[in-house]
Image: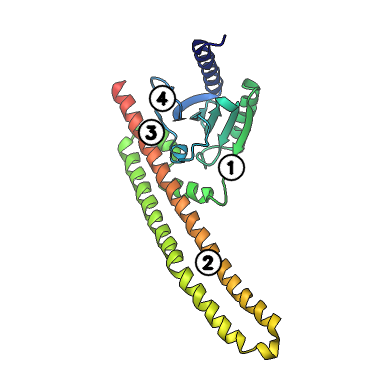
Amino acid sequence: MDTRGDRDRRDASERTRIRAALQAFGSILAVKLYRLNEDGGPDIPTLPCLDHEAMLHGGIQAHAAVYLQEAASGDLHEVAVYPGSRRIEIDIVSTWGEYSAESLARLQAHMRRTLPDYRLSVHGPSWWRGERRVAQACLAQVSLREVLLSSDFAAVGRRVNRLQVVGSMMEKHSRVASWGVRTVTGPLLTAAGVATFLAVGSWGEALGEDAVIAIRYGVVGILGAFFLYYGLKAVQLTEMANRVWKRSMEYALILSERQRLQTRG
């Protein structure tokens, strides 16, 4: 019979195997955990995975994501491991500008070779979520390499604070756009519908009833599509602002953990 102790030993053995595979490629600089309680190690900053902890639907599998520095080149990568589904995901958005295509190819080959029973995928930037613009906005203020490796905590902390300010301002801009959609859409569509009904109705005898109906629905439909696009754009801005703010919080937690570990060491 499979006991709890047997499962715990198998899980511990699997975690050891995964860590050995990652460390064979380079140094683990930080660990992000989602629904897992295993620490990264005595000298590795460990923090919650903020991107997924903020999702309240609970549909994300438990996983650990590590920031990994390749020993050969010094390039940075983020590798997320999902033990339950035997899946590995390399996130190239969070390490934007910190790796080369050659280093990424070496990482993929290494993961396939050392963990052949895991399914490997690469998470690229999403246009809808504006991840490329988020990565560029974050990199303009502070780089991931500075957060993970710089010993000047004060200077990096100031840059992280600036990133937090940028994220807060982006969130306020998105609120303005969202407020405009909620306030303007209803009255404008109503006014356009009434104006179109009255104006086009006078052309009934010249154009015919079918043409008048088509014009009325066409005008209202075009306006509705425009405001729908405007509303979706406001949602996208909010998503981008939240991601910038979460990234700044993640950087702040990494710095705090690094300072704690340095003081303890």
Q: CA distance from mark 3 to mark 2?
A: 41 Å
Tell me the distance, in whole angstroms, between the alpha carbons under discs 4 and 3.
Answer: 10 Å
Q: Is residue 128 visible?
A: yes
| Tag 3–tag 1 contact (CB < 8 Å) | no
Q: Tag 1: residue type? A: Gly
Q: Secondary structure at mark 1?
A: loop
Residue under numbered circle 2: 227
At 40% from the left and 62% from the top, the residue drawn is: 176
Residue 37 placement: quadrant: top left
The residue tagged 4 is: 44
Classify residue 193 as left or right of residue 153: right
Q: Nearer the viewer, residue 45 or 38?
A: 38
Residue 155, by quadrant, is top left
Category of crowding for the residue at label 2, using alpha-carbon neighbours closer than 10 angstroms: few (below 14), some (14–19), many (at least 20): many
x and y, in percent, of residue 134 in the image: 48, 49
Mark 3 sits on what residue? Answer: 254
Residue bearing the label numbered 1: 124
Which comes before the other along the chain, label 4 or label 2? 4
Give the quadrant of residue 24. Answer: top right
Give the quadrant of the C terminus.
Answer: top left
Q: Between 15 and 113, which is closer to the camera in this rendering? A: 15
Mark 3 Cα shell of 10 Å, populated few (<14), some (14-19), many (≥20): many
